[in-house]
Image (tube, rainbow, N blue to C red):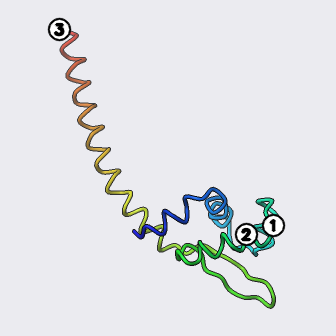
Amino acid sequence: MKTTTLNALAEPNRLQIIELLREGPLTVGEIADRLHLRQPQASKHLKVLSEADLVEVRADANRRIYRLCPEPFMEMDAWLHTFRSMWEDRFDRLSDYLNQLKKSDYP
């Protein structure tokens, strides 16, 4: 996973843009309206997201329509999976330990 992915998502407005785009493609104007941003602000955030390959844009006349790129999110999911496995193992050991304690409390 690229560190640019996490850096781009660390800013709250950009994370909100990603959440909006989960519902489907949107224009810059629609994103700006929904997040109560000025269009230049929304465009600036979308540029960062685009440079991080999190969104892609297509032109439709004079409008720019943005949509999510699935690949970086799949990479992030794979990266997070390594942590899930580690925590699941730890929770399994904790569960075993708690079961042992419970058995030792009840003769």
Residue under circle 3? 107
Q: Residue at x 81, y 59 (%)?
A: 36
Where the N terminus falls, by quadrant? bottom left
Q: Residue at x 78, y 63 (%)?
A: 37
Residue under circle 1? 38
Q: Earlier in the sequence, mark 1 or mark 3?
A: 1
Q: Nearer the viewer, mark 3 or mark 2?
A: 2
Q: Residue at x 68, y 70 (%)?
A: 24
Left or right: where 86 falls relative to 35: left
Q: Residue 33's x, y, as percent?
A: 82, 64
| Quarter holding residue 38 | bottom right
Q: Residue at x 27, y 32 (%)?
A: 94
Q: Earlier in the sequence, mark 3 or mark 2?
A: 2
Q: Does 98 appear above or below 7?
A: above
Where the C terminus falls, by quadrant? top left
Q: Nearer the viewer, mark 1 or mark 3?
A: 1
Q: Residue 54's x, y, as percent?
A: 55, 72
Circle 2: residue type: Ala
Q: Residue 52's x, y, as percent?
A: 52, 74
Circle 1: residue type: Arg
Q: Nearer the viewer, residue 32 or 88?
A: 32
Circle 3: residue type: Pro
**Whole-number angstrom distance, CA of label 3 to CA of label 2:** 65 Å
Residue under circle 2? 42
**Mark linked to residue 68:** none
Q: Does 24 appear above or below 91?
A: below
Q: Are marks 1 and 2 in contact (CB under 8 Å)?
A: yes
Count all numbered tags in the image, as a single digit.
3
